[in-house]
């Protein structure tokens, strides 16, 4: 596990320029979403039905594009690590290979969400009733800092319990799907993709892979939970700490995202012989 973490981090630190070239459509799509939402939100404030519909459609379209752009960048990152390809400025139009990658990601996400919703639907209402019953009904929109601080102290056990349940669930999903994880780099570098059973043949899962992915995946959430639990609400509400934590959060999330992609690539390299040259898109 330690080798995965150190080698994966080294791949990220040595590929910052490549990350910019591979994932610039993600930033472009996000900024476009913000701009369109601001314009549509202005007209929606005027109680325009058409503007409200346009706001919803633009949000959905933007989210889909950002997701596909992330998948396209992930494909390029896998190819950079495994095939030693020099990253070039990627096309803003997602390619067919990224669509196949997105389908595999979507399958994993759906499985995780179903399990997480099944657990949360039973645990969260129970925890909420226990830890916040003494607070009564609170309007958090206009509540003073003192009330928000009481609310923060009351809900931190719920935050920790939710995070713990997500870690346990993800551990189970990754453990049972550990022979399926190499599918992501496989799709990225192979010119053809056989059926799932054929992909699995000969792909032995590497020891420490699941643990390394869990650390990388939940590191931002763990740090965010520690911040919300340890820092008083009076500090969190200040503009400067809020902006700094938002920027730092984006950086950490993106670093861990690339870190996870690198770990998957390294695990695939250990599992199979990677072709030296393969430039098919």
Image (spheres, rainbow, N blue to C red):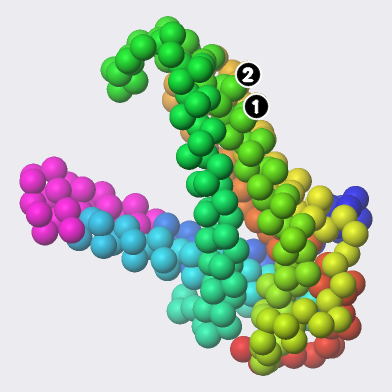
Q: In the shown orientation, is residue 146 left or right of residue 24? A: left
Q: Is residue 217 visible?
A: yes
Q: Which residue is mark 2?
A: 230
- Residue 148 position in % (x across, y down): 42, 15
Mark 2 neighbour density, 10 Å: few (under 14) some (14–19) many (20 or more): few
221 in relation to 141, above or below: below
- Whether 129 is drawn above or below 257: the answer is above
Give left or right: position of 236 versus 15: left
Q: In the rendered view, tell whether residue 211 sits above or below residue 279.
A: above
**Quadrant in which the C terminus is drawn:** bottom right
Residue shown at the point (90%, 50%) measured from the top left = 2
Left or right side of 232 for 79: right
Residue 71 visible? The answer is no
Q: Check contact, mark 1 vs mark 2: CB within 8 A.
A: yes
- Verify whether residue 279 appears in magenta: no
Quick check: 207 left or right of 73? right
Query: Could you say where residue 209 lies in the image, as x and y percent from the top left?
Result: 83, 58
Residues 87 and 204: in front is 204
| Real-space CA distance between mark 1 and mark 2, rounded to the nearest whole angstrom | 6 Å
Residue placed at 45% from the left, 79% from the top? Answer: 93
In the image, what residue occupies the spot 88% across and 64% down? 206
- Looking at the picture, how far across and down is residue 32, in whole percent? 35, 60
Based on the picture, tell me whether residue 36 belongs to the magenta stretch. Answer: yes
Report the front residue among 148 and 104. 104
Magenta span of residues = 31-53
Classed neighbour count for the residue bearing mark 1: other residues with Cα under 10 Å, few (<14), some (14–19), many (≥20): some
The residue under label 1 is 226
Query: Residue at the location (48% across, 24% down)?
Result: 128
Secondary structure of the residue carrying tag 1 is helix
């Amino acid at each position: 596990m330690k080798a995965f973490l150190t080698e994966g981090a080294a791949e990220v630190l040595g590929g910052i320029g490549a990350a910019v070239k591979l994932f610039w459509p993600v930033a472009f799509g996000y900024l476009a979403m913000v701009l369109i939402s601001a314009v549509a939100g202005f007209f929606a404030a005027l109680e325009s039905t058409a503007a409200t519909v346009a706001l919803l459609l633009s949000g959905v379209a933007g989210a889909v594009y950002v997701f596909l752009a992330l998948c396209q960048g992930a494909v390029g990152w896998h190819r950079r690590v495994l095939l030693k390809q020099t990253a070039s400025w990627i096309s803003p139009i997602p390619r067919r290979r990224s669509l196949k990658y997105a389908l595999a990601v979507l399958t994993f996400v759906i499985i995780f969400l179903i399990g997480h919703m099944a657990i949360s639907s039973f645990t969260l209402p129970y925890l909420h009733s226990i830890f916040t019953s003494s607070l009564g009904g609170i309007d958090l929109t206009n509540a003073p800092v003192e009330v928000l601080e009481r609310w923060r102290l009351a809900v931190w056990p719920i935050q920790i319990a939710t995070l713990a349940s997500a870690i346990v669930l993800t551990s189970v999903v990754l453990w049972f799907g550990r022979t399926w994880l190499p599918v992501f780099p496989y799709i990225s570098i192979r010119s053809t993709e056989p059926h799932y059973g054929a992909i699995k043949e000969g792909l032995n899962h590497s020891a420490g892979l699941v643990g390394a992915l869990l650390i990388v995946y939940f590191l931002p959430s763990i740090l965010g939970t520690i911040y919300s639990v340890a820092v008083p609400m009076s500090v969190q509400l200040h503009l400067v700490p809020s902006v700094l934590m938002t920027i730092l959060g984006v950086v950490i999330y993106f670093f861990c995202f690339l870190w996870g992609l690198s770990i998957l690539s390294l695990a695939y390299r250990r599992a199979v012989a990677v072709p030296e040259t393969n430039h098919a898109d």
